[in-house]
């Protein structure tokens, strides 16, 4: 590590500076190949956050699937972001501080930041790391709370899977407040967010890409070799993919639909009864996959379209459960399944409210 302690780099990420401030430490790190990473995680030798695998450019064929997802998904994300912005504005009296969970929360956070500004509210937007079993980046939170009131903190993520990060967030936030954290997502199939646009497991376009739609940053890293006392959690910036980066154009495209939709205030559909129904159904779906496959480690189960897709891209999948192989929402996932020869099982009733669930191979 260099002798000067750099908490964060001002040149971090590829978004416009007014759209988001990443509170992350930019580092360079040796990458770990997927098989070695899987072995180390499952043997308990290393935590997933200590390693990073090299991100590859999405293929032209995969980007065509992304373009198809944008044809319907960009408008839905835009309109629902407007709805969420109104819901956030109604739930916070004073200054609003969006804390997007890196990385999946960031594209939505950028759009919400613009929308809440357009509603005339005092808003700031930060990208912060949260890591399962380790918690939220305390250094970053202290930095934010030095200038922004805790009552106005709103955490943002793209979607929920099993709800593990929600649980982590609730546990971590106790250090800063006696209140439960405000947690906002576009899609909340497992019913664990406080504000959500719906409980549908739908194809959020940013969910099927990695760094090229998240400001070129890697998943966050917490490894004592690169993160010292007083540092933020770390990330690698994947500059080798700069030619493929669509982070700015993606949020600009979604914003085209958000801006006009802000004129209409639609009440949030997410109430306690809807959340409860989704929680029960989601728990039952995960329990079924666990029982069906005699799974000892629940972290091998990745439910929801986005998580199921990312698990195929980043991990070693054993099989995928899908609601229907012909569902247009699952086109990108089915492409990966066929491309990589991953077995799949059609089980719509058993995995509802999810459209897809990936089971990661047991390797140790």
Image (tube, rainbow, N blue to C red):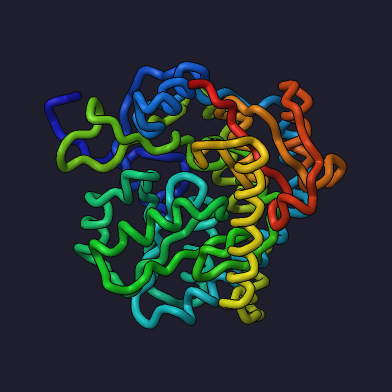
Q: Position of residue 97 (x, y in %)?
A: 37, 66
Q: Residue at x 37, y 61 (%)?
A: 170
Height in image: 353 above or below 46? Answer: below
Question: Residue 257 appears in which quarter of the rendering?
Answer: bottom right
Which of the two residues, 340 or 220, is positioned nearer the viewer here? 340
Q: Position of residue 95 (x, y in %)?
A: 34, 74
Q: Position of residue 153 (x, y in %)?
A: 36, 67
Instruction: Tell which residue pokes out farthest to the right in this image.
Output: 326
Q: Nearer the viewer, residue 142 or 60?
A: 142
Q: Is residue 72 above or below residue 261?
A: above
Say if residue 66 shows up in the picture.
yes
Q: Quadrant of residue 346?
A: top right
Q: Which residue: 67% across, 71% down?
A: 260
Residue 204 relative to residue 331: left or right: left
Picture mark count: 0
**In the rendered image, the vertical position of residue 149 relative to residue 317, given as above or below:** below
Q: Residue at x 78, y 36 (%)?
A: 345
Which residue is situated farthest in the left direction here? 3
Of the 4 image quadrants, the one containing the N terminus is top left
State whether residue 110 appears in this view.
Answer: no
Q: Position of residue 41 (x, y in %)?
A: 42, 27
Q: Nearer the viewer, residue 364 or 179?
A: 364
């Amino acid at each position: 590590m260099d002798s000067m302690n750099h908490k964060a780099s001002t040149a971090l990420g590829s978004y416009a500076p007014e759209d988001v401030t990443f509170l992350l430490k930019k580092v360079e790190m040796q990458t770990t190949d997927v098989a070695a990473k899987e072995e180390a995680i499952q043997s308990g030798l290393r935590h997933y956050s200590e390693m990073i695998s090299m991100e590859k450019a999405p293929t032209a064929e995969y980007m065509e699937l992304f373009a198809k997802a944008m044809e319907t998904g960009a408008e839905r994300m835009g309109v629902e972001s407007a709805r969420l912005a109104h819901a956030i504005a109604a739930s916070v009296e004073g200054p609003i501080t969006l804390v997007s969970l890196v990385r999946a929360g960031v594209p939505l956070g950028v759009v919400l930041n613009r929308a809440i500004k357009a509603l005339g509210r005092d808003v700031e937007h930060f990208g912060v790391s949260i890591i399962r079993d380790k918690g939220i980046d305390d250094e970053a939170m202290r930095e934010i709370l030095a200038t922004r009131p805790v009552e106005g903190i709103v955490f943002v993520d793209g979607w929920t899977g099993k709800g593990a990060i929600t649980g982590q967030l609730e546990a971590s936030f106790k250090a800063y407040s006696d209140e439960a954290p405000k947690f906002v997502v576009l899609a909340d199939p497992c019913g664990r967010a406080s504000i959500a646009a719906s409980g549908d497991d739908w194809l959020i376009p940013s969910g099927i890409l990695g760094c090229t739609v998240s400001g070129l940053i890697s998943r966050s890293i917490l490894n004592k070799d690169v993160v010292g006392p007083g540092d933020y959690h770390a990330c690698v910036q994947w500059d080798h993919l700069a030619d493929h980066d669509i982070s700015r154009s993606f949020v600009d495209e979604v914003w085209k639909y958000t801006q006009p939709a802000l004129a209409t205030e639609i009440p949030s559909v997410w109430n306690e009864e809807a959340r409860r129904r989704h929680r029960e159904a989601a728990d039952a779906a995960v329990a079924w996959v666990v029982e069906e496959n005699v799974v000892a480690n629940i972290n091998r189960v990745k439910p929801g379209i986005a998580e199921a897709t990312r698990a195929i891209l980043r991990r070693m999948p054993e099989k995928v459960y899908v609601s229907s192989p012909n569902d247009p929402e699952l086109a990108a996932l089915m492409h990966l399944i066929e491309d990589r020869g991953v077995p799949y099982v059609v089980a719509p009733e058993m995995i509802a409210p999810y459209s897809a669930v990936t089971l990661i191979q047991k390797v140790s």
